[in-house]
Amino acid sequence: MSKFEELSQAFTNARNLFKQYEEDCKVFSKEVWDKLIHYYEIPLSDISLHNIDAYGVPDKILGFKELILALREDGYFEFGVGFTLFETPKVYPYPHYTIVLPVNIAIDRDGKYKARYGESGKEHIIDRTKDADYHKFFDEMYKLIKSEYEEGLSNLQLHNTFRAIGFKNKED
């Protein structure tokens, strides 16, 4: 085998390892998705899956066969979970708005599964056999999202702006 062929083989081996890593992360992302739906008790009509491009722009997709995990510079894969939130009581026609939450996942060298909410979220080590590990992650997401709405209302008044998470501009 020539040096060039050896390099090609090394490249092939590295690509196969990466493809397996990506597939393992996709399986993990599906578990996060399923457990999130169950834990938050989200109606399937009010949740959606999104690919997120390099610019952070979400693109709604129909299922995990279409999921393209975006590899971030920090080694995490990212995908989006959309929640369609509505004003209560839910009486048709009701005002509603879809927010897309960035979920970052990775598997470290020791085989530990990691998840965080967005790039600045707290890293959670998740033992896939323990629902409590998922619940800690979901509870943090819940608290952050809820606080963004509460702070958004304060910022709306303080800064005389119409834009805050989940609120539309006057022009929208």
Image (tube, grey):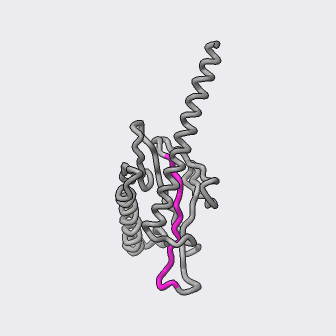
Q: Is residue 49 left or right of residue 119?
A: right
| Quadrant of the image occupied by residue 111 | top left
| Residue 14 seen anywhere in this rendered image of the structure | yes
Q: Tell me residue 113's x, y (percent).
A: 42, 46
Name the residue located 52 percent from the left edge and 61 percent from the top edge. 81
Name the residue located 37 percent from the left edge and 49 percent from the top edge. 125
Name the residue located 60 percent from the left edge and 49 percent from the top edge. 68
Q: Tell me residue 154's x, y (percent).
A: 37, 73
Q: Is residue 140 left or right of residue 2?
A: left
Name the residue located 51 percent from the left edge and 68 percent from the top edge. 83
Residue found at the very far top of the displayed protein: 2
First to last magenta residue range: 77-90
Closer to the camera in the image, 165 or 7 = 7
103 inside magenta stretch:
no
Q: Main secondary structure of the magenta part?
A: strand
Q: Is residue 111 above or below residue 51?
A: above
